[in-house]
Image (cartoon, helix red, strand yellow):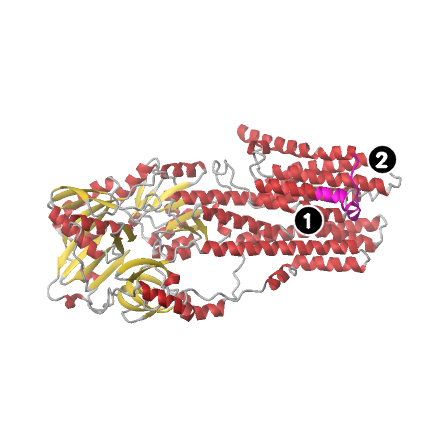
Amino acid sequence: MTQRGVPPGTGVEAAGLSSNRAAALLKETGPNVLPSAKAVPQWRKILGELTHFFALMLWCAAALAFIAGMPQLGTAIIIVVIVNGVFAHIQQERAQHAAAKLRGLLPADVSVRRDGRLLRVHTSELVPGDAVLLAAGDRVPADVTLATVSACTVDESMLTGESEPVPKAAGDKAWGGTFLVNGQAEAVIARTGGNTRLAGIAALTSGTVSPPTPLSLELRRIVRLIAAVALAIAGLFFVVSLLVGIPWRDAFLFAIGVAVALIPEGLLPTVTLSLAMGAQRMAARNALVRNLEAVETLGSTTFICTDKTGTLTQNRMNAVEVYTFDGSIRIAGEGYRPTAVIEGAGVSLATRAAVAARAASQGRAALHGDEWVAEGDPMEAAIDVLARRLSDGDPPDVKPARRLAFDPGRRRESVIVGTTLYLKGAPESVLPLCGEPAVAAAAEVAKMAAKGLRVIAVAARELPGSAADWLDRPPEAVETELQLLGLIALHDPPRPDVGDVIRTAREAGIRIGMITGDHPETAAAIARQIGLMGTPETVLDGSQLPEDEQILGALLDRDGIVVSRVAPEQKLRVARALQGRGHVVAMTGDGVNDGPALQEADIGVAMGLSGTDVAREAADLVLLDDHLATIVAAIEQGRATYSNIHRFLTYHLTDNVAELTPFVIWALSGGQFPLALGVLQILALDIGTDLLPALALGGEKPGKGVLKRPPEKRHLMDSRLMFRVFCVLGPVEAALEMTAFSMVLFAGGWMRGTPADSALVMAASGAAFTAVVLGQLANAFACRSATVPPWKQGWLTNPLLLWAILAELAVLAVCLYAIPTMLGHLAPPPAGFAVAVLAIPAVLAADWAHKKLRRNGRTSG
């Protein structure tokens, strides 16, 4: 429904506030931001990390240890709880701070009239009395009173729960945080910041907790699985301990210690850190991740549905040709300067067409003549420049009595100025309204589109009677019996590197399709020019897409497909059809009606520069530069982050094999073979030497080959990871550990069945401890890649890992020479140390052999 606007002369396009007055009001009212929710005290956050399921279990174990007279074990368990709790708290705080910092990168500007000029200011700088311009897709920046409206409806569902958009008339209120669904409006700010209606509702809902993400749920399942295995193993050792004659109290505490040592308390915060680091790296490359779990999903993307304008092209439009019935003219000008070289006949009618198109643009772009830079829609700016160039820099200003805003269904917009209607839109929407003379123009549209130009048709009509007679009539009754003024062809050059980006995506096994609202010939020409068009060439029209979803999916599921003249609801069907074919779909969008498609896609990608607020709210990823290359870079980081989680799991589980092996051998021997490692030593390994390398692996940068292979969607604990852990790296590390332990024992004269000297066992245990730490060192380098040996990656390419290894060696020295008896071992003799050092080449050799066999197997297959 179109509402009547405020008549001219009542402030429809008033200058608004002055800059000085706005600055004074900003000091008085404060910034236009919602009040921050009351922060949860740090002590409560830390307490939460110390009282979850695993922590409570460990507190109980520590209490039992003290009751049973084993204060050392009890103290060690308490240290485990506190260290992991503090670490988890630090990572959660880092993740929250990073998310807050990234949210600050989101575009949050609004068009406002100040000092008689149209400016873009940050929403936080708005003050009561500011005159703001809003278009479909914009978020209402504060509580406002609508001064003028054109076909304006507002989505107030976030406040009222009602899904139907609410029609608005001049004088109505609109609330901050809601969205314009259709039309345009100029509004005056009434209340800002904490005085808005949204601020009151936000205060009531500030305690809402977001549901866990799919990735978090899978990680929790892994942790619970490992914890269940640890408890089962602990129960088994308790039974074996009783069978070999150990008192039940000692056996019970022994079993508790085993369980404590094997539970991966630090897994979740480490993965959170890896995701947060991935999100920060994406932001550094102009890709803002709005949900951390999207970092992982990005790595699995198999099909990118990309728009054309801005993503594949530069979104720097320039009108280069105008066709009229008097002839065609060509325009060559630099940037947005009003001067240009004009060639051809029909300049007079071309000028009228440009002025009419500028009037129909309804002020959505402004040129600042001091530097000749544009604010607003690039296409509207190009039309404004064209009008200036053809009018010697001084096109007439118009005061419209009514505006009929652009509508995706009509694909056109118009204004009534006096008794004249000016209209512009897609040629196939405008030409049928212009009668028989316009038929010849269709051939010109095809010629222009074939050159990759975007074509706009401009028409006009003299309305009989007075302007007041037409203010309330529907668009269908007004936009008829038109006279075609001309066709304006705009050139939007492709991004210079987009061809390389497309090749990179295809090397990564990702298919790319162009889903655009442009003319089929324009879209096809650009697709050929940048190398996107597939073979055979397939160009579909959105209006001709088959209704059957399976047929649609089969038609779309090909690399380099072009779908033109796509309506927003058809983009939703495209996403669903490709998902039905098993694809993980990344869908770009910028319009208000793109929201459903962005939400339906596995990864919704919104344009940060040219997109609407609605699109950005619905998206998982916001491109701060609107560039296809940024999507591919984000996919690369997503794959790297998923690989980092695999790295950490491989590293952690491999060391668990080495930590468990002494207990298995002790149990199988019925307690006759001495225990190579005690519970306190395992706790020292987990706390002192295992943690930092794991964190360094979680921050590994993308490898060179991460985009050289097709995407894989695997479970975190898949068969390849388990084989590498339990059949390659883990057994080798455990074998060197037990070899070092046995060598020291037998060299010291111990024989099976005879009591072992305690000092000899402690020295042998020191050798086993050293072997595990040095095996961890080699394992950390091995886990950097599942396919490439460390020496081909470069030993110095992960500085975080180097610092972690140095810290690990320092902790080893402390454990061997500063506090050995506290842990129950002694520094190993030279021979034992020599065997322990062999763990480094042994682990690296086993890793190299496994990777070589896998590579040869793929080659022969």
Q: Is residue 292 magenta?
A: no
Position of residue 685 measured from the top left corner of the image (x, y, whole percent): 70, 46
521 on left or right of 286: left
135 on left or right of 699: left
Question: Is the residue marked by circle 2 packed among few (<14), some (14-19), or many (20+) residues within 10 Å?
Answer: some
Q: Is residue 822 magenta?
A: yes
Q: Residue 422 lies in what quarter of the image?
A: bottom left
Q: Residue 67 lies in what quarter of the image?
A: bottom right
Q: Which sits in the foreground, 475 or 372? A: 372
Q: Residue 479 lies in what quarter of the image?
A: bottom left
Residue 687 is tagged as 1
Q: Which sits in the foreground, 369 or 786? A: 369
CA separation in Å, label 2 and label 1 = 31 Å
Q: Which sits in the foreground, 549 or 216? A: 216
5 on left or right of 234: left
Pointer 2 residue: 748
User: Relative to residue 375, is residue 817 depicted above or below?
Assistant: above
The amino acid type of the residue labelled 1 equals Ile
Quadrant of the snapshot with the N terminus: bottom left
Point 53% across, 45% down: residue: 641
User: Relative to residue 781, is residue 219 depicted above or below?
Assistant: below
Is residue 842 among the parts visible in the rendering?
A: yes
Position of residue 216 measured from the top left corner of the image (x, y, whole percent): 56, 53
N-terminal of the pair, mark 2 or mark 1, is 1
- Look at the image and give the residue range highlighted in magenta: 811-829
Point 67% across, 42% down: residue: 808
Position of residue 278 measured from the top left corner of the image (x, y, whole percent): 51, 47
Q: Secondary structure at mark 1?
A: helix
Position of residue 557 measured from the top left corner of the image (x, y, whole percent): 39, 42
Q: Which sits in the foreground, 604 or 537? A: 604
